Amino acid sequence: MGEIPLANFINFFIYLFIPFLFGFLAKKIKISPIVGYIIGGIALGNLFQGIISPEIINNIAFIGIILLLFTVGIDVNIQKLFILKRFILFGGLLQLLLTILFIAILSSFFGFTPLQSFLIAIAFVSSSTSLVAKLIQDRGEEDSFLGEIAVGLLMFQDLAFIPFIIIFTFFNTQNVSYLELTKNIFIALAEAGVILYLMYILGKRVVPKLFNSISKVSRELLNLFVILFIFLIAGISTLFQIPILVGAFIAGVLVSQTTEHFHIFSQIRPLRDIMAIIFFVYIGTNVKVAEIGPILPKILLFSLLIMFIKALIFLIVFLYFKFSSRMAFTIAIFLFQVSENAFILSSIAFANDVFTSQQYLFVISSVILSILVTPFMINNKDNIYNLIRGFFKKYIPSIEIFIKHKLDFDKSPLDEFDISGHVVICGYGRIGSNVGRALNLANIPFIGIDYNFNTVEKAKKEGINVIYGDPTDIDILDFVQTEKALAVVVTVPGRSNQEAVILNSRKLNSHLYIISRVHNTVDQERMIDLGAKSVVRPEVEASLSIIKKLFLLKRMPKDEVIKRLRNIRLMKAFA
């Protein structure tokens, strides 16, 4: 084996060091490092031309794409899609169709041909799984109802990637008749349908047994078999003329149905993360700043309209499903951006001469812009929502009245409540409903408020006093007689929402006993400052419960257990 040339080491060092710096800076200013990697790639592509070897980087980037799609497939939970099928399957399909239609129309106004407009619409219809799922996880919202809906929609869009990539590989020229376009779409959908059916059958009956039998022999053999399995599925895909990237994704989805998929994901994730970074940097290297300059205003306008269209469609679809304006807006903010899969699809179209170099640059620049603004939008979604509602209230009161009384509040079950000394539960999700059941068993009167219409309808069928409305709205709190209440329990997610509930409740009744659920020390101190009498952190309470059981297991006296738990609560780690 010959020596590796020094130039190769310099290539890789520069290629990784520049994105590392930008990723580090991005993390420091609390935005996704993916943004930093892309900007680092832009810097490489414009300042280091001729220094780094594009051939070496392209090959590694392609391996990165394969591993990225494989791990995206592992994250797909087909059973979970059916649990929330009304919202994920029906809502997701409705969103896909509407988004493709309106983005295709928009693209035609920007000078793209009908075929190019259609392919752009397909490429732009999905949202970024890797970015959004990470941001939701960082915010601790993956187990919330909205978090589950958002992640479920991302899974549905990932499955839709199969027909999308098949459609893209059909076209290697811009000159395609409408008849050929329609024929190719139907062929792609038929192929995708067969693939999805086989995936479901194999994933349910064959693959889990195969992986289970190998895992019993050796963990090392299981790790080796994963790589073998990826090559096997990729080889079968090539044999049947299915794109290799689809094969990688299929392999991931099949592995996701096994009981070993958590172990497999943990083993391959570090390598995937490194390869994914190289892929995002590679995308950035394709952006030529000098060429973007003259068309930058056009790119900015196109990107803004794309994001607005996607957000508006998500908003309308989930308002149709009786979500409150705040919930529908949150889903829209989670999913308004364009997926990193658009890079893969547009690169295929560019390689097949469907896009010119300037059109390809225009498309990927729009994708990058949508990804760049996503972390800011998600982290400030509550503030943005409140600003929009404030604007309507001040300048367009008719829209504010419609939102308040038609979308977010349903008084139909009761004209008014004749109640006092009760508990108001703001947020009737998992924690709120458990509190409600306990109060019901103790014959303590309570009223729940929730902006999930389906949660409210289910609770009403069980004979529970729950109204559909936004718990942060002072008029809703007034309607449930908060001024006569004994206590308010705040379980709604989001710091700004909790602040609004506490402040509005105290305006109505300054003597209320307010209990708030929070997730971190900063929020805990903030809620106490605003007037909460008791603050509960579920993670802390769970850990204390475990500690208590362990103390009792060691036969520690109960008085000593109580004393130690009290001391632990005062420790900085549990503050």
Image (cartoon, rainbow, N blue to C red):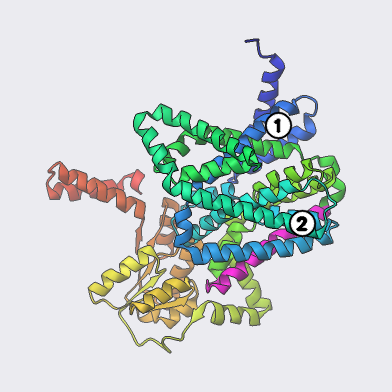
Mark 2 or mark 1: name the one nearer the start of the chain: 1
The secondary structure making up most of the magenta span is helix
Q: Quadrant of the N terminus?
A: top right
Q: What element carries label 2?
A: helix
Image coords of residue 162 (percent x, y): 62, 50
Q: Which mark is residue 555?
A: none
Q: Which residue is drawn at 65% across and 75% down?
A: 392
Q: Position of residue 44 (x, y in %)?
A: 74, 32
Residue 301 visible in rendering:
no
Q: Residue at 46% across / 47% down in the picture?
A: 203
- What is the C-alpha distance between the residues marked 2 and 1? 30 Å
Residue located beneath label 1 in the image: 58
Near-viewer residue (454 or 210): 210
User: Is residue 472 in view from this perspective?
Assistant: yes
279 relative to 500, above or below: above
Above or below — where is 110 with respect to 274?
Answer: below
Residue 64 appears at what percent x and percent y? 62, 35
Where disc 1 sits, the SS reads helix
Q: Would you say residue 358 sits in the magenta stretch? A: no
**Callout 2 crowding tier (Cα within 10 Å): few <14, some 14–19, many ≥20:** some
The three-letter code of the residue at mark 2 reads Leu
For this orientation, the residue located farthest to the top is: 2
What stretch of residues is rendered in magenta?
297-325
Query: Marks 1 and 2: in contact by CB < 8 Å?
Result: no
| Residue 151 percent across, percent down from the top left | 52, 55
Q: What residue type is labelled 1?
A: Asn
Which of the pair 12/489 is nearer the observer?
A: 12
**Residue hosting label 2:** 181
